[in-house]
């Protein structure tokens, strides 16, 4: 069993950053288009049965005695999977986008950190007979790569455990406090030079905290869904080079430029700095879950009006990041956070979170989704829209997932700063069209 596994320092940091206005959960909205009637009771029972077999979903964080400030995952003795799963039928379709409106309210509600850190809603009554699954996972529980592994455990076609409590991975043997200190000291000394380099880069990369897209604290969230065609992304790559991720970042840069101008903000001669999370998860870490993250800082060229110029600027910026690697540079600060004592996060994580605008203006993350055709109770998935938590004082967070023939983009906005996320959603489509015209 995984019970008793210690949270990493970065996992503890995500727990400590949690607040009513800064809920630190990731989300996903997965849509389905069934051929017949939706049997909600059957689906929720099936989801509860599968969730009960996933060890990570049965655990909650508990304070550990040593080292100070640490926490462990402990099996919840009162766990009942069905208590984390709800069915909601949307009776009114007068909303222009009923799923987005419902999901926005759902996304803004924090998880109860005294219970297993997940929540799942089945939403029926959508136009054209569609239904959706809305999944929340706290960032302390896993990163984007691990979240996918949890999500597919709820779907069809995967081998499942036959015993409820056995995960196939035994926890490490308990260590004495003396052994723990020796191990931690040895690791710290081995990483000291690299950590000092990251810290120095972070200090040099800090800027004025007055971001052009800053936001006041708010419990409100607004979500938007955008879908792009992967064939069009390939056409742009063939014409201008770079990676698919470069193309998407250039499209988002154009959308953010348009959105800023529509808000009456100056975009020319400006950049918006995006944190691009990078998974450093190995195969062994994949079994244990938790966060295994580094990152790049990428200055998005919102000041450039020409879409090809924007793409070339993104290519140069990301090439520099990749040449340095994910273990160097200011974007690697998650690695630095993972090497700090847990107690330091307990004391300073909220202050560190408020300092996020000193380093970046928004997060743009890519969630890996393999191309296998996924389904639930025989109904194939239509769309997969991921959502990333909003850092304090930031207005926008963007998550991207490529599934089958589409790039799915989840937009999450601070409701106090962004009254209508539709302007940004339309900006993504317009920016993609302009770049495609050049191909």
Image (cartoon, rainbow, N blue to C red):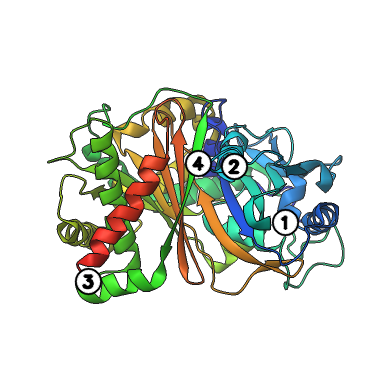
Image mark for residue 98: 2
Q: Quadrant of the N terminus?
A: bottom right
The answer to whether the residue labelled 3 contacts the one labelled 1, judged by CB atoms less than 8 Å apart, is no
Q: Earlier in the sequence, mark 2 or mark 1?
A: 2
Q: Real-space Cα distance between discs 3 and 2?
A: 35 Å
Which residue matches tag 3? 439
Secondary structure, mark 4, is strand
Q: Real-space Cα distance between discs 4 and 2?
A: 11 Å
Q: Real-space Cα distance between discs 4 and 1?
A: 38 Å
Which residue matches tag 1? 171
Which residue matches tag 4? 223
Q: Earlier in the sequence, mark 4 or mark 1?
A: 1
Residue at left offset 40%, top offset 38%? 396
Q: Look at the picture and state if 340 lies above or below 418.
A: below
Residue at left offset 30%, top offset 53%? 430
Q: Earlier in the sequence, mark 3 or mark 1?
A: 1
């Amino acid at each position: 069993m995984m019970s008793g596994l210690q949270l990493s320092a970065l996992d503890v940091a995500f727990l400590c950053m949690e607040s009513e206005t800064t809920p630190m959960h990731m989300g996903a909205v997965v849509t389905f288009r069934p051929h017949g009637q939706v049997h909600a009771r059957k689906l929720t029972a099936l989801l509860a049965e599968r969730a009960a077999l996933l060890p990570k979903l049965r655990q909650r964080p508990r304070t550990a005695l040593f080292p100070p400030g640490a926490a462990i995952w402990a099996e919840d003795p009162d766990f009942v999977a069905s208590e984390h799963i709800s069915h909601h039928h949307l009776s009114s379709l007068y909303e222009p986008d009923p799923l987005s409106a419902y999901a926005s309210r759902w996304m803004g509600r924090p998880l109860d950190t005294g219970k297993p850190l997940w929540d799942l809603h089945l939403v029926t009554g959508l136009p054209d007979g569609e239904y959706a699954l809305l999944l929340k996972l706290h960032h302390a529980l896993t990163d984007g790569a691990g979240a996918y592994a949890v999500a597919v455990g709820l779907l069809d076609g995967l081998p499942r455990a036959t015993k409820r409590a056995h995960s196939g991975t035994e926890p490490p043997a308990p260590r004495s406090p003396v052994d723990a200190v020796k191990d931690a000291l040895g690791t710290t000394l081995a990483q000291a030079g690299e950590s000092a380099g990251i810290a120095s880069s972070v200090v040099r990369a800090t800027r004025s905290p007055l971001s052009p897209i800053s936001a006041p604290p708010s419990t409100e969230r607004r979500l938007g869904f955008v879908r792009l065609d992967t064939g069009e992304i390939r056409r742009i790559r063939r014409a201008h080079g770079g990676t698919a991720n470069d193309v998407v970042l250039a499209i988002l840069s154009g959308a953010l430029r348009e959105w800023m101008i529509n808000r009456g903000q100056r975009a020319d001669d400006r950049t918006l700095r995006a944190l691009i999370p990078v998974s450093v998860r190995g195969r062994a870490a994949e079994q244990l879950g938790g966060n295994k993250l580094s990152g790049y800082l990428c200055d998005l060229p919102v000041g450039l009006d020409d879409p090809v110029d924007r793409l070339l600027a993104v290519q140069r910026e990301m090439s520099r990041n990749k040449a340095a690697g994910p273990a160097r540079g200011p974007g690697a600060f998650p690695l630095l956070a993972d090497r700090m004592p847990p107690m330091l996060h307990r004391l300073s994580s909220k202050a560190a979170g408020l300092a996020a605008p000193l380093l970046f203006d928004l997060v743009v993350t890519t969630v890996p989704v393999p191309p296998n055709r996924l389904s639930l109770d025989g109904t194939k998935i239509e769309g997969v829209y991921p959502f990333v938590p909003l850092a304090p004082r930031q207005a926008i967070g963007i998550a991207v997932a490529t599934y089958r023939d589409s790039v799915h983009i989840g937009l999450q906005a601070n409701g106090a700063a962004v009254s209508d996320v539709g302007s940004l959603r339309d900006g993504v489509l317009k920016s993609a069209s302009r770049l495609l015209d050049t191909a």
